[in-house]
Image (spheres, grey):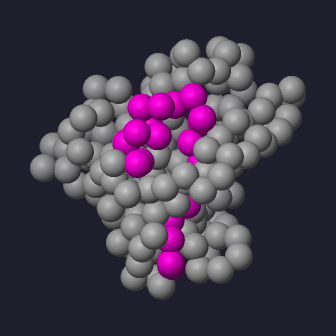
């Protein structure tokens, strides 16, 4: 059975480890190896993860029989209005299809609802059709597209999606 639990600061290395084991296969046909390395080093340094935690982000870990399956990171009251933002969600390749992704999103949505959030937002790479299809199946809708300059000549070319809560 899949279990979801909140990750304390002392376990943020689990988030980092899962990201480093997931990104190369997830983005192999979407991003260059150099951009993957750049983004992992930037977004998943322990310093960055700790700073996000201190700013109010919550990290959840999905496990089954003591084995890590994936994680989600989210923030309440994102931007204007009572909206939650799912900043990160990744599952190990061998864990996909077990229901862990859906369990993580349902847990984030439940926590957001209990905190009076009206919707849950997320960004997804516009070429990650597998993820886009998954989000559409569970009720998200595309609301707009955006291109974000992340430095060093790299861009994130995303679809922004929203789930009404």
Q: Is residue 17 above or below residue 82?
A: above
Q: Classify residue 126 by image quadrant.
A: top right
Q: Is residue 141 visible?
A: yes
Residue at x 56%, y 42% (from the top left corner): 124
Q: Position of residue 63 (x, y in %)?
A: 26, 46
Report the residue that reaches farthest toward the left: 1
| Camera-side residue of 4 and 27 | 27
**Is residue 122 among the parts visible in the rendering?**
no
Assign the C terminus to one quadrant of the image. bottom left
Query: Magenta part of the protein: which range?
Result: 117-136
For residue 61, above or below residue 121: above
Please state the horizontal and vertical placement of residue 158, each as a whole percent of the image.
Answer: 65, 41
- Residue 159 placed where, x, y %? 61, 44
Q: Residue at x 53, y 38 (%)?
A: 16
Q: Is residue 98 left or right of residue 60?
A: left
- Foreground residue, 94 or 63? 94
Magenta region includes residue 139: no
Q: Quadrant of residue 68?
A: top left
Q: Is residue 32 left or right of residue 137?
A: right
Taking the image as shown, residue 138 lies to the left or right of residue 77, namely left
Q: How many marks?
A: 0
Residue reaching furthest to the right: 152
In the image, residue 129 above or below residue 159 = above
The residue that appears at 50% across and 65% down in the rendered structure is 120
Tell me residue 62's x, y (percent). Answer: 31, 49
Q: Quadrant of residue 92?
A: top left
Q: Relative to residue 31, is residue 73 depicted above or below? A: below
Horizontal side of residue 2 vs 61, given as left or right: left
**Residue at x-position 42% and y-position 32%:** 130
């Amino acid at each position: 059975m899949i279990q979801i639990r909140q990750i304390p600061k002392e376990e943020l290395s689990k988030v980092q480890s899962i990201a480093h084991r997931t990104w190369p296969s997830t983005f192999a046909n979407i991003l260059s190896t150099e951009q993957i390395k750049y983004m992992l080093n930037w977004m998943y340094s322990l310093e960055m993860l700790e700073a996000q935690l201190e700013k109010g982000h919550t990290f959840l870990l999905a496990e089954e029989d003591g084995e890590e399956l994936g994680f989600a990171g989210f923030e309440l009251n994102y931007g204007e209005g009572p909206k939650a933002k799912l900043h990160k969600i990744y599952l190990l390749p061998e864990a996909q299809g077990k229901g862990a992704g859906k369990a993580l999103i349902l847990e984030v949505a439940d926590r957001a609802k209990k905190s009076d959030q009206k919707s849950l937002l997320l960004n997804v790479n516009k070429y990650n059709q597998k993820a886009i299809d998954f989000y559409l199946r569970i009720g998200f809708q595309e609301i707009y597209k955006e291109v974000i300059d992340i430095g060093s000549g790299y861009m994130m070319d995303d679809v922004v999606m929203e789930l009404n809560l």
